[in-house]
Image (cartoon, grey):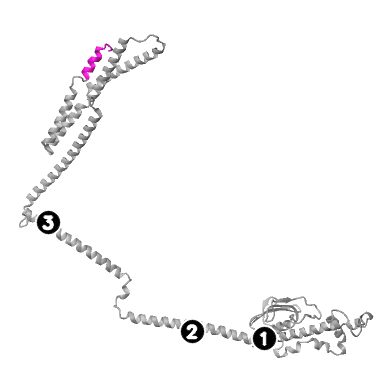
Amino acid sequence: MKLVQLEIQTLPGISPGFSVDAFDAGINLVVAPNAGGKSSLLRALNYLIAGVRQGDPAALALTASFQDAETRWTVRRTGSSIVWEKNGQPAEPPPLPAFDQLHCYWFSMEDLLSADARDENLLLELKRTLSGGFDLDAVLQQPEFTVGVRHGATQASALTEASRKRRGIEADYLNLSSEEARLPELSKKLEDAESAASNAREIAQALSLMDARDSRLQAESGLLTFPENMPNFRGDELTKLDELADERKMMSVKREAQHAALEEAQQLLNDTGLAEGSPEDAEFDARYRDIEEIRSNEAQKKSANERLSAAGRNLQQSLLQLGATSIPPKLDPFSISEAETLACRIQKLTLERDEITARMPTTTARPDPREQAALDSAAEALRGWLNADKASLWIPGLAACLMVAAAITGFLAGAWLAVTLVVIALVLIVWTLRPDGSSGFRKRYEETGMT
């Protein structure tokens, strides 16, 4: 198999990772300064091919691809897990040399440089490649490269200093290598510490569970001292007990009130003289009918008082509206007929007034004062007549209502209120018969000659 790709994602000593896939079909030389990753390539191949060994670092993420005729093999290692694929499908690994035989397949540069004469061409090619593609021996034979004894002293001094630094770097590298060699041990210690921490958490959890179990057992043993019906309690018994105590107090107050009412009823019963013996059912029925009749009379009395009060309020309001000269109208057919007649006359006079008003702008002569006075007197008499007729329409009706109210009041409330209503009704009737009523105004209007 030929290596065609190697990818290092995670490997101790390499950060960040890298991938190598530009391998030539012939011999490939990897050239890099110290700590450049040359040895890491070999270590990565060793971890992939040798399998899982004791002491391998836990932090490994490597991938390599090999080509064997028509078969492409891919191997991936993550930690201690190694998976092989054959043409993209999981498969068993191909035949590989044992771990103790792998060193037989590794050739160092020193091995190649110490090859016999038959490998002279390979040796020369390796030297040329290591020299950047130049034959340094042939170059040194050129005249322009011939130098004196002191030539390059400065460069030699710089080289000495660089060599000193290189040795320091190599020493640091060795220290790093030793530290890297300790990585498996440190990883093992880290795993042990993590395992110990996990065990400590589990132990703490177990102790917590044991404490919870002991608390539960203690609680269960404590529950055994309570009554058997304790599981039926819901935790609000004290609140309900307080509510029941309040309800008991309220019932005691009610009971005392009922007891007082009972004593009062007993006293009333004793006052009636029925405590020692009850009357007959017929007598009870007669008394019950009397009570119902009294209640009915009281209701009628209350209704009559309300109507009387309403009539009194209406009377006071009407008197206030009428003043000293106004009389309520009388609603009878004769009065209505006269009102219609007066309305026709008023309409006729209104038309005449409008006609006179229309002629006034074209008239230059002043009206006769006597005619004007006669017209004013007729108008005043007509207004008094109309107002008297309107006022006489409702007085008789109101007087009749007062007489009916007086009769009802005399039956229910007493004679003094009935007498008062009768007096008010008589005053209204006398008011309608005064001399300056409707007939007086009518006579004055007829005397004006305007009829």
User: How far across and how far down the image is residue 94, in percent?
Assistant: 70, 83
User: How far across and how far down the image is residue 99, in percent?
Assistant: 70, 89
Precedes in sequence: disc 1 or disc 2: 1
Query: Which residues make up the magenta segment?
Result: 438-451
User: How far across and how far down the image is residue 213, in percent?
Assistant: 41, 82
User: Can residue 242 be found in the magenta stretch?
Assistant: no
Q: Secondary structure at mark 1?
A: helix
Give the residue displayed 75% in from the left and 76% down from the top.
21
Assign the C terminus to one quadrant of the image: top left
**Number of the front mark, 3 or 1:** 1
Camera-nearest residue between 388 and 215: 388
Amino acid of disc 3: Ala
Q: Based on the displayed image, in which of its 4 quarters is residue 413 positioned? A: top left
User: Can residue 450 be found in the magenta stretch?
Assistant: yes
Which residue lies under the disc numbered 2?
203
- In the displayed structure image, the side of residue 308 where residue 451 appears, left or right: right
- In the displayed structure image, the side of residue 328 where residue 62 appears, left or right: right
State the CA–CA distance, disc 3 to disc 1.
112 Å
Which residue lies under the disc numbered 1?
179
